Amino acid sequence: MRWDFWINFRIYARLSAFLREVSMQQNNKTIVVKFGTSTLTQGSPKLNLAYMMEIVRQLAQLHQAGFRLVIVTSGAIAAGRH
């Protein structure tokens, strides 16, 4: 399987610029997104649910635009603390 994009979200990362870039490249339909613990917690000891909901909202826009999404996460320790 070939991955067209690998996005590594960092603190305060946004998809808007990425959406504009991807929309110009019609052949790329699979996007792999990796969320690390620092992204999912935003520096706190627990998961930042508000931030995660914003990420999901942006990923839903990609899905509605016809992209296949593969989501890779870590954050098991933080999830256990939650």
Image (cartoon, rainbow, N blue to C red):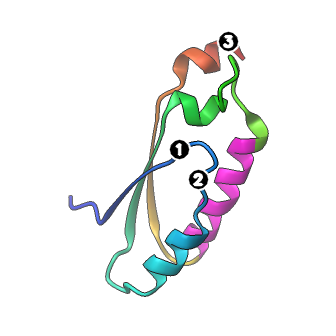
How packed mark 1 is, by other alpha carbons closer than 10 Å (few <14, some 14-19, many 20 or more), is some
**Alpha-carbon span between mark 1 and mark 3:** 21 Å
**Which SS type dominates the magenta stretch?**
helix
Residue topped by disc 3: 81
Disc 3 marks a residue whose amino acid type is Arg
Question: Is 72 placed left or right of 46 in the picture?
Answer: left
Q: Is residue 33 magenta?
A: no
In the picture, residue 30 is in which quadrant? bottom left
Question: Is 61 placed left or right of 54 in the picture?
Answer: left
Q: Report the residue at 78% width, 41% height from top.
A: 50
In the picture, residue 6 is in which quadrant? bottom left
Name the one closer to the observer, 67 or 17: 17
**Alpha-carbon span between mark 2 and mark 1:** 5 Å
Disc 1 marks a residue whose amino acid type is Arg
Name the one closer to the observer, 65 or 45: 45
Going from N to C along the chain, the mark reached first, 1 or 3, is 1
Image x and y of residue 2, in percent: 21, 61
Residue topped by disc 2: 13
81 above or below 58? above
Q: Which residues are magenta?
A: 51-64
Disc 2 marks a residue whose amino acid type is Ala
Question: Is 32 placed left or right of 47 in the picture?
Answer: left
Image x and y of residue 72, in percent: 43, 41
**Alpha-carbon span between mark 2 and mark 3:** 24 Å
- Quadrant in which the C terminus appears: top right
Name the one closer to the observer, 16 or 33: 16
Under circle 3, the secondary element is helix
56 above or below 73? below
Residue topped by disc 1: 10
